[in-house]
Amino acid sequence: MALIGPHPQGPILIAWASKTGNTGTLAQRIAELLEKHGLEVELTAVRDVDWDQRGRWSALVFGSPTYGSGDLHPDWDKPERRLRDLDLTGWPSAVFGCGNPRYVTPWWAVDILENRLKNGGAKLLVPSYKADTLTGFRVRDADTWIESLASALLPY
Ligand SMILES: Cc1cc2nc3c(=O)[nH]c(=O)nc-3n(C[C@H](O)[C@H](O)[C@H](O)COP(=O)(O)O)c2cc1C
């Protein structure tokens, strides 16, 4: 397993999946605000990500809602298995996702992605963002988190 490191001048990959649209909307907002900070972004549905191309990106930002009994969105299943085989040492990264604390497995998908990155050796730049959609979803609630992510990404 060869280490492919981040490309300092490359775009930031935002890989996301969503069923009812919330995590997709959040991914778009993240892209929009990071771009406002002059960061280059590649916003891609996770099912369309070609992991062999990872040497083009400067950082990895992953998003998934939680479904089932604490599961990732199904589009993440294959990529999550693929990521187990990759050495992500030194990769700047972050995770976000929508969930609902009414479930016994709140935001577990976010925890799964966070652990996958950590176990691969990636560097989590900021605490993961867990959007609470119990009482409705307001995408702008994420702006403070996105600003802290932008600040953490700027040196890369
Ligand atoms: C059948 C079903 C199961 C769910 N299971 C969980 C869960 O285990 N944990 C959690 O935090 N949220 C759970 N949720 C809430 C969703 O994660 C939440 O509605 C989220 O906003 C969906 O994101 P999306 O619009 O990006 O698909 C569940 C929702 C449904 C409909």
Image (cartoon, grey):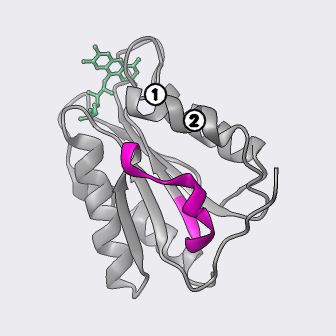
Residue 130, above or below 8: above
Task: Inspect this view and state whether residue 154 appears.
Answer: yes
Task: Inspect this view and state whether residue 125 appears.
Answer: no
Mark nearest the camera among 1 and 2 is 2
Asked if the residue under mark 2 is in contact with the one under mark 1, i.e. CB atoms within 8 Å, the reply is yes
Quarter placement of the C terminus: bottom right
Callout 2: helix, strand or loop?
helix
Separation (CA) of disc 1 from disc 2: 9 Å
Mark 2 C-beta closer than 8 Å to ligand 1: no
Residue type, numbered disc 1: Leu
Identity of the residue drawn at 26% across and 60% down: 28
Callout 1: helix, strand or loop?
loop
Identity of the residue drawn at 38% across and 75% down: 34
Residue type, numbered disc 2: Glu
Which residue is identified by label 2?
80
Q: Is residue 52 magenta?
A: yes
Which residue is identified by label 1?
72
Q: Is residue 117 magenta?
A: no
Towards the viewer: 125 or 122: 122
Towards the viewer: 38 or 53: 53
Q: Is residue 40 left or right of residue 82?
A: left
Report the image quarter containing ligand 1.
top left
Residue 152, above or below 104: below
Q: Position of residue 38 (x, y in %)?
A: 40, 88
Residue 148, above or below 102: below
Q: Residues within 10 Å of mark 1 (few under 14, many from 20)?
A: many
The magenta stretch spans which residues?
Answer: 47-60
